[in-house]
Image (cartoon, grey):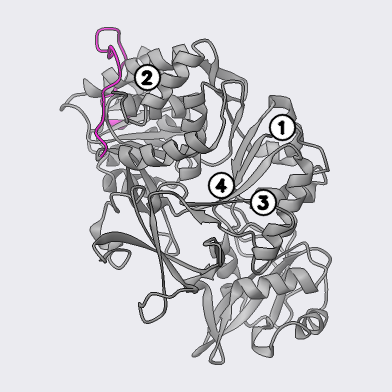
Amino acid sequence: MASKALHARFLRGLEKSPAGVAVRVGGDTVDYTTAHATALAWAGALLAAPGGPPNAVGILTGRGTTAYLGILAALYAGLPAVPIPADFPAGKVVSMLGAAGVSALVVDEEGAALLAGGTGAELGGLPVLAPHLDRAGAEALAAATGLPVLAAAPETALAGPRDAAPDDVAYILFTSGSTGRPKGVRLTHGNMAHYFGLMDAWYDFRADDVFSQAAGLNWDSAVSDLWCAWAAGAPLVSVPPHAYRDLPGFVAEHGITVWFSAPSVISLSRRTGRLLPGSMPTLRWTYFGGEALQFEDTDAWQRAAPGSAVINVYGPTETTITTHRHRWSPEESVRLGVNGVVPLGLLHEGHAELLLDERGEEAAGEGELWLAGPQLSAGYLDAEDGHGKYLERDGLRWYRTGDRVRRLADGQLVYLGRMDSQVQVQGYRVELAEVEHALRAASPVTGAVVVGVPVANSAELVAFYLGEQRAPRDFHRDLAAVLPPQLIPRHYHRLDEFPLNTNKKTDRLALTALAAERHGTKVWDTALAPAAGAPRAA
């Protein structure tokens, strides 16, 4: 019987493409045979670490090939992989490693530099595998950090990957949510087996495909990229920041056929002027997730990639990558969507969904989305984080998503907004997504984000926009024709671009902080000096 362990997918790819490229980062490539042998050697070194086999392996790296091989090595060792970017603040790294119970690290040059800079002294003797270092470098790192530095050797290399049970944890991924405090989510091999089983059934991925890898390896969309590519025996190409200056050029250069990213990438590419009709002919499959996907952006991408299916996917990290999907159709998607947003689509097979109203009673048409099923994670590392989020009801274990959705007649869901994105303005409940849609539709802007700023017992709406500078009275005139007075923002602030996080998602927390800092400024669309780290205003 074939193993259901996540890393068995790599063995499938190895069989199909032993000499093929498994991962490409810039000019560095690693083929499947080399990756397999390297991961076995590293896995053996981790299991032979002083103090016994680790509980979990932290992969503290940049986006080089060490990161990918470190994840594979952790799973080959039968241990949870905990990818953490080495450019995170040191205090955050230490907190995440402690929360995840990490007891061994794989590091590259960036990770080693973070440890040597003082972070290593806070890790209490954690063994470190630093495969880029020679013996002298390893001794220097050990001296600088006080940590034992492991070395991969033929005598400790595994003969083959260790198996894993469905309930064993494969990944620990951290999600900050609305609070900004990292919460570790435990995703099991069983969770992954169900998700990837569906992906294998739905899509015709092949060894001659080329997969993009846009998100950071600590995000669940990167998990999908990685293991879809590796099961197909296809190459995975890391997307560097500079690629977004000419994304169609990057796609053409590498012959990318499968793309997965946050939707913000589309508007970013449109602003460069490079996302032209027919500019990405190699794409066969495109997936967007993590944010609301707008009609106009989707249409632009589809025209640029006429040979690609464009799929909107939805699913919190807590439910293993995605739980819903909808294929873009210019006519049908627009007819079904709400507020200019592409539908979330139908629920994955084997799962259950509930829509609950404010009283906690089941609603037929509209409410907060709850999800249950085989992709529901094992929960957060800290049980307190799961209070009010993972709940028992009707004999099932559910996850409360915090997303407001509407169920259509055919069973598809459409996204209405976050439960916590509703704000009270003079006693009137305002859905921010509705205001944003009105701004895009009624005003000549190229992008819009609306946030609420608390004022006494109410709130004021602040609109950030892209495009030509306009007077607030012009916005008010346009919006008064389509919105009631309570929904019209009081303040308008033009930006050159929206702040994005590392995965190219619009950073709403940064915009909310900027709005709160500047609240009370009478004229918002003038050149004001931004706070450090804030997006630059026009």
The residue at which mark 3 appears reads as 328
Asked which secondary structure carries label 2, the reply is helix
CA distance for labels 1 and 4: 17 Å
Q: Is residue 488 above or below residue 126?
A: below
Q: Is residue 273 one of those drawn in magenta?
A: no
Residue pictured at 41% horizontal, 40% vertical: 84
- What span is colored magenta in the figure? 143-166
Q: Position of residue 455 (x, y in %)?
A: 54, 86
Asked which secondary structure carries label 1, the reply is helix
The residue at which mark 2 appears reads as 39
Q: Earlier in the sequence, mark 1 or mark 3?
A: 1
Q: Are marks 1 and 2 in contact (CB under 8 Å)?
A: no
The residue at which mark 4 appears reads as 503
CA distance for labels 2 and 4: 26 Å
CA distance for labels 4 and 3: 22 Å
Q: Earlier in the sequence, mark 1 or mark 4?
A: 1
Q: Is residue 45 above or below residue 100?
A: above
Q: Residues within 10 Å of mark 4 (few under 14, many from 20)?
A: many
Q: Earlier in the sequence, mark 2 or mark 4?
A: 2
The residue at which mark 1 appears reads as 250
